[in-house]
Image (cartoon, helix red, strand yellow):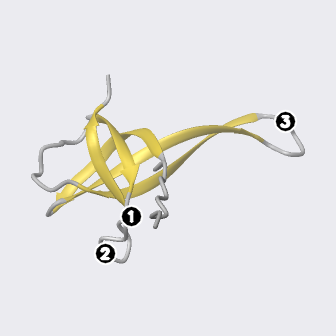
Amino acid sequence: MEKNVVSTKKRRIKGEVVSDKMEKTVVVAVPRMTRHPLYHKIMRMTKRYKAHDEYNRFKVGDKVIIEESRPISKDKRWVVKELAK
C-alpha cells in the first residue's frame, strides 16, 4: 500500500524583535506597506507576532526570520528560526 505523504510549506516572514521580556518568547514586529483604498496614500502598518525562542538567544533589535508552527500557547504559533542577514 502507498502511504499518503502530505508536504506542507510553512510560511516564513522577516521582522525585528521588539520585546524579549518573557521567558522563551519574543515579540517580533513585521512591517508592511498598504495603500489606503480611498485616498491612495501608502501607509506603513506593523503587526506583532509572539514567537517561541527556546534558548532566549535573540535580543531586542535583532532582525529574525520566524516560521509558522503548531500552536505552542494561546498566542504563540510562530518559532524563531534564525537571524536574518
Q: Give above or below for 23 relative to 48.
A: below
Camera-side residue of 53 and 37: 53
Q: Is residue 32 left or right of residue 74?
A: right
Q: Is residue 42 left or right of residue 11?
A: right
Badge number at residue 77:
1
Q: Do the residues labelled 1 and 2 touch (CB within 8 Å)?
A: no
Label 1 crowd (10 A; few <14 / some 14-19 / many >=20): some
> In percent of the image, x 12 and y 44: which residue is there?
57
Type of the residue with mark 1: Arg
What's the CA distance linking mark 1 and mark 2?
7 Å
> In percent of the image, x 37 and y 67: which residue is there?
70
What's the CA distance linking mark 2 and mark 3?
38 Å
Mark 1 or mark 3, which is nearer to you? Answer: 1
Please state the horizontal and vertical placement of residue 42, each as a whole percent of the image: 73, 33
Please state the horizontal and vertical placement of residue 82, each as a whole percent of the image: 26, 37
Q: In this view, does 29 lie to the left or right of 54?
A: right
Q: Are marks 1 and 3 in contact (CB under 8 Å)?
A: no
> In percent of the image, x 52 and y 40: which residue is there?
31
Please state the horizontal and vertical placement of residue 16, each as a whole percent of the image: 35, 39
Per the image, the residue denoted by label 3 is: 40
Please state the horizontal and vertical placement of residue 1, each as a whole percent of the image: 46, 67
Mark 2 or mark 3, which is nearer to you? Answer: 2
Badge number at residue 73:
2
Type of the residue with mark 3: His
Type of the residue with mark 2: Ser
Q: Earlier in the sequence, mark 1 or mark 3?
A: 3
